[in-house]
Amino acid sequence: MLKSYRRLYNIWCVLVDGGCTVLAFFSAYTLRVWAMPLSFPSLSQRIIFGWELYLPVFFLCAFAVLTSFFALGSYKLPPGRSLIDILWGNIKVIAVAVLLILAVAAALRLDYLSRLFVILFLASFLLFSTVAKTLVSRWFKASANAGRYNRMLLLVGADSHARQVAETFLRNQELGISLRGFLCPDKGVDEADVERLEKLGLPRMGYASELPRLLQREVIDGVLFAGEARTMDRKLFEELCISCEDTGVDVLLPVNPFPHLIAKCGLERIEDLSLLSFTTIPHNQVALFLKRALDTAGAFLGLLLLFPLLLIVAALVKLTSRGPVFFTQERVGLRGRLFRLAKFRTMVADAEERLDELQEMNEADGPVFKIRNDPRVTPLGRFLRRSSIDELPQLWCVLKGEMSMVGPRPPIPSEVAKYEIWQRRRLSMRPGLTCLWQVSGRSELGFDTWMKLDLQYIDNWSLGLDLRILLKTIPAVLTGKGAA
């Protein structure tokens, strides 16, 4: 009930964006075939194809754009957003869509893909979608403020919690919910609390036991039991809920059994079994699928394009020091799963055997071992570490699904064994090549700060955040800031 108005708004946004993709297609084709050759004579020398040959490109672009909207959660937003908010949201979607288009085009080797047409399509879509969704957003906000299409909600309860609930609805008119009034509990009414609710503009409509009669004469779409109303006599509470059920009125109950939990609450249903779930990790399956698809495409392209560099580095490692080319080590991945991580060897061959004698030189706090001028590191190894080239073989782990392009760095089992319980939550997402720690100073940061940055990443994860971290990784690698 509470999200029905928002869902209707977002359905309209989906329909508008679908229409804008079609409009953008014809606009891009018209600009490419008719307008641009007049302004740029060199384009008139190129072969002009019929519109039907651009259809595969259109379907790819439309798929990338609409998938990015769903993945970034753009169709879960309330109406009433400003032009700037909608424009910025569309720009982020276009940025992710461009990466997706390039990844698919490279993976499928779509050599015929018209880059000019793609640019014109995305630019046209950005304009049309921003204008159209701004108009839709303003219409829905105006309708909610005017009370059109609103659902009537009756509040049962009169204490501070009921007042907090009422203030929340009054602040968020774009929900499309109007408060009809409130009912007091039959016992233990505090008149001061009642007066505070009445000052908010809510009429007192009687006592909770009068609800069945009230449902028969008033326009009420839902009844919300708040505050002390949730602790009323069980038999009376059941009778009131049955009355709502008999008259087809929704019953709403605030669920907050553990106020100190930061986990998001949701409802899971398996056949006739209803369960409340509490989770602190992302569960947007569309976004997670897209993240995995981009990881696969990015790792494949990275290995393909960097293959000559990998061969050169492998040869240099072999020629400059005794020992294997790769250093492999067991690492802890998603939820504690173990996997073998490979890096270009940057230390002498017996580095692991010499670890114990260097423990007193450890400069890192927590269970991590770090020495800024580690005597075991070879001259070539220092360059490889500073430039992060030694990490490139991990693209194979990304391709296999053991790692991601962005995520908390994978620890070794001995470190995890020393974790405090709150630090283990960083294992709830697939480990990555780069992360917030990587672009925030790396070895210059303390262990607790590192852990908190990883948890901050998990709590605020989105494809847009992954994109920002990847972009920040480039200057961090080039400058070698914080590399040990």
Image (cartoon, helix red, strand yellow):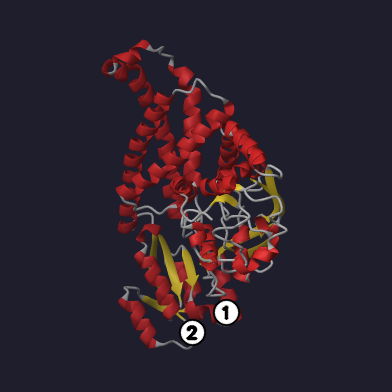
- Image check: 447 left or right of 154? right
Q: Position of residue 161 (x, y in %)?
A: 45, 77
The local secondary structure at tag 1 comes to helix
- Using the rendered view, name the quadrant where residue 451 is placed: bottom right
Q: Residue 136 versus residue 59: which sits nearer the camera? A: 59
Q: Which residue is mark 1?
A: 236
* Mark before the other along the chain sequence, 1 or 2: 2
* SS at badge 2: loop
Q: Residue at x 51, y 46 (%)?
A: 387
* Residue toward you, 132 or 456: 456
Give the residue displayed 58% in from the left and 50% down from the top: 432
- 390 vs 61, left or right, is right
Place of residue 207 in the rendered image (x, y in percent of width and height, measured from the top left) = 45, 80
Name the amino acid, label 1: Leu
**Are the residues at dot 1 and dot 2 in contact (C-beta closer than 8 Å)?**
yes
Residue type, numbered disc 2: Asp
Q: Position of residue 110 (x, y in %)?
A: 53, 24
Residue bearing the label numbered 2: 186
Q: Residues within 10 Å of mark 1 (few under 14, many from 20)?
A: few
Q: Is residue 349 left or right of residue 265?
A: right
- Residue 246 sits above or below residue 114 on the image: below
The residue lying toward the viewer, choosing from 277 and 478, is 478
Residue 140: in sight, yes or no?
yes
Q: Is residue 168 shown left or right of residue 461?
A: left
